[in-house]
Image (cartoon, rainbow, N blue to C red):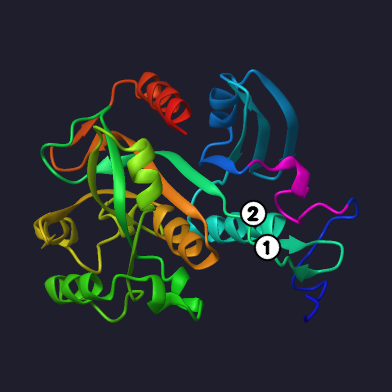
C-alpha cells in the first residue's frame, strides 16, 4: 500500500491533522458542522460534558457527550473551499493511519449534519422556518476537480438544469448531489424539503446587486422557475454541494438543514433568527 507523502497529508508536530488540529481519538462518529465559530458553543452548551476542545484558525471543535452519546461540533467557516479542507481532514482522521500514512483496512463512516442559515427563493418559504436540502446544486465547481464527480452527481438533473438556465459557459460547470437518505429519514420528519443552491459568494453569485452588474441579470427568476420531477429550487447557501459530494465519494452520510433568515422573493429578513437556530439545534440533537 502506497505511503501518502508528508507534503500531501500534512500533520502538526503533535501528530494532529493540519487545519483542524484534531487527533483521531478526539472525533466522534456523529458530527454537527456549523459555519460560524460562535455557533459551536450554542451546540455544545447542550452537552452533558465537553471532553475535547480544540481551536485553530476558524476551525473550532467541541467533542462531548449528549445524553451519553459522543458528538462533535465543528465550525467550518464559509464556503465550499473550507468544506473541501474540513471533509478531507475528517475522512483522514477516520480512515487513514496517520502514523503509517496509509489508508486503514476497515472503513469508518461518519454522520455529518450541517446546521446553517439560508436565503429562501420561493414565496412560501417564511423567515425563521426550517429547510432540509434533499439535493444541492454547486455553482462553485469544486467537485469538478475530483475523478468520481460523475459517479455521485445527478447527471439527468444537471442536464435539465443547464438547459433550463441556458447555462453560460463562462461560469463554473454546476454539479448536483443528493443528501443522505439515511439522515433524511432519521432527522427530516416534518421538515420542508427542497433543492439548495450552494453559491461561491454572497453577493453576485447569489444575484445581489450593490455596485456591480451581474453576468446573468435574471438568474433568481430563472432559478425560481426550475422544476424537475416535482422538485423545485428553494434556497441559497454556500456549503452543501461540497459537503454532499465529498461525503458521497468518501463513504459518509451528510445532510444540511438551514433556518431561512431571508426571503429573497418577498424582500424580507428575520428580525432575530437566533431563537430559530437554537430551536433547530435542539431538534437535530434530539434526532441525531
Residue interval drawn in magenta? 15-28
Q: Is residue 22 visible?
A: no
Query: Which residue is painted at 18% across and 61% down in the image?
Result: 219
Using the rendered view, name the quadrant where residue 242 is placed: bottom left
Question: Which residue is identified by label 1?
Answer: 106
Side of 258 relative to 220 (left or right): right
Taking depth in this image into account, of 28 and 167 the one nearest to the observer is 28
Label 1 sits on a secondary structure element that is loop
Q: Could you tell me how far apart the alpha carbons at marks 1 and 2 are, in whole angstroms?
A: 16 Å
Direction right: furthest residue: 13
- The mark tally for this picture is 2
> For the stretch drawn in magenta, what is the main secondary structure?
loop
Q: Could you tell me if the residues under marks 1 and 2 are in contact, i.e. CB atoms within 8 Å? A: no
Q: Position of residue 248 (x, y in %)?
A: 46, 63
Using the rendered view, name the quadrant where residue 57 is placed: top right
Pick the quarter of the image with the N terminus: bottom right
Q: Is residue 109 magenta?
A: no
Query: Which residue is painted at 40% across and 76% down in the image?
Result: 151
Q: Position of residue 249 (x, y in %)?
A: 50, 68
Q: Decide: is 283 above or below 107.
A: above
Taking depth in this image into account, of 178 and 78 the one nearest to the observer is 178
Q: Nearer the viewer, mark 1 or mark 2?
A: 1
Query: Which residue is painted at 58% across and 57% down in the image?
Result: 87
Q: Position of residue 102 (x, y in %)?
A: 78, 71
Report crowding for label 2: few under 14, some 14 to 19, many 20 or more residues within 10 A (C-alpha): some
Q: Is residue 156 visible?
A: yes
Q: Is residue 24 magenta?
A: yes
Q: Position of residue 203 (x, y in %)?
A: 34, 52
Q: Decide: is 253 above or below 166.
A: above
Task: Return the mark for residue 90.
Answer: 2
Side of 261 relative to 221 (left or right): right
Query: Which residue is painted at 54% across and 23% down in the image?
Result: 42
Amino acid at each position: 500500500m502506497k505511503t501518502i507523502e508528508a507534503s500531501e497529508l500534512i500533520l502538526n508536530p503533535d501528530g494532529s491533522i493540519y487545519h483542524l488540529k484534531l487527533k483521531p481519538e478526539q472525533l466522534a462518529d456523529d458530527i454537527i458542522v456549523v459555519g460560524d465559530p460562535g455557533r459551536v458553543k450554542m451546540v455544545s452548551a447542550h452537552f452533558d460534558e465537553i471532553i475535547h476542545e480544540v481551536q485553530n484558525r476558524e476551525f473550532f471543535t467541541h467533542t462531548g457527550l449528549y445524553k451519553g452519546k459522543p458528538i462533535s461540533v465543528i465550525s467550518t467557516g464559509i464556503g465550499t473551499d473550507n468544506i473541501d479542507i474540513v471533509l478531507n481532514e475528517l475522512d483522514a482522521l477516520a480512515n487513514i493511519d496517520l502514523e503509517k500514512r496509509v489508508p486503514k483496512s476497515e472503513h469508518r463512516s461518519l454522520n455529518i449534519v450541517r446546521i446553517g442559515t439560508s436565503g429562501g427563493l420561493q414565496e412560501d418559504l417564511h423567515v425563521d422556518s426550517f429547510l432540509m436540502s434533499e439535493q444541492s446544486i454547486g455553482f462553485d465547481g469544486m467537485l469538478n476537480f475530483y475523478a468520481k464527480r460523475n459517479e455521485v452527481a445527478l447527471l439527468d438533473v444537471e442536464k435539465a438544469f443547464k438547459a433550463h438556465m441556458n447555462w453560460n459557459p463562462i461560469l463554473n460547470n454546476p454539479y448536483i448531489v443528493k443528501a443522505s437518505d439515511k439522515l433524511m429519514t432519521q432527522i427530516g420528519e416534518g421538515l420542508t424539503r427542497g433543492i439548495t443552491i450552494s453559491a461561491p459568494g454572497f453577493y453576485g453569485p447569489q444575484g445581489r446587486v450593490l455596485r456591480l452588474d451581474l453576468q446573468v441579470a435574471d438568474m433568481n427568476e430563472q432559478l425560481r422557475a426550475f422544476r424537475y420531477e416535482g422538485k423545485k429550487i428553494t434556497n441559497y447557501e454556500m456549503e452543501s454541494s461540497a459537503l454532499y459530494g465529498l461525503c458521497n465519494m468518501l463513504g459518509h452520510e451528510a445532510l444540511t438543514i438551514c433556518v431561512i433568515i431571508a426571503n429573497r422573493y418577498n424582500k424580507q429578513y428575520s428580525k432575530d433568527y437566533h431563537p430559530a437556530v437554537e430551536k433547530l439545534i435542539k431538534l437535530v440533537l434530539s434526532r441525531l
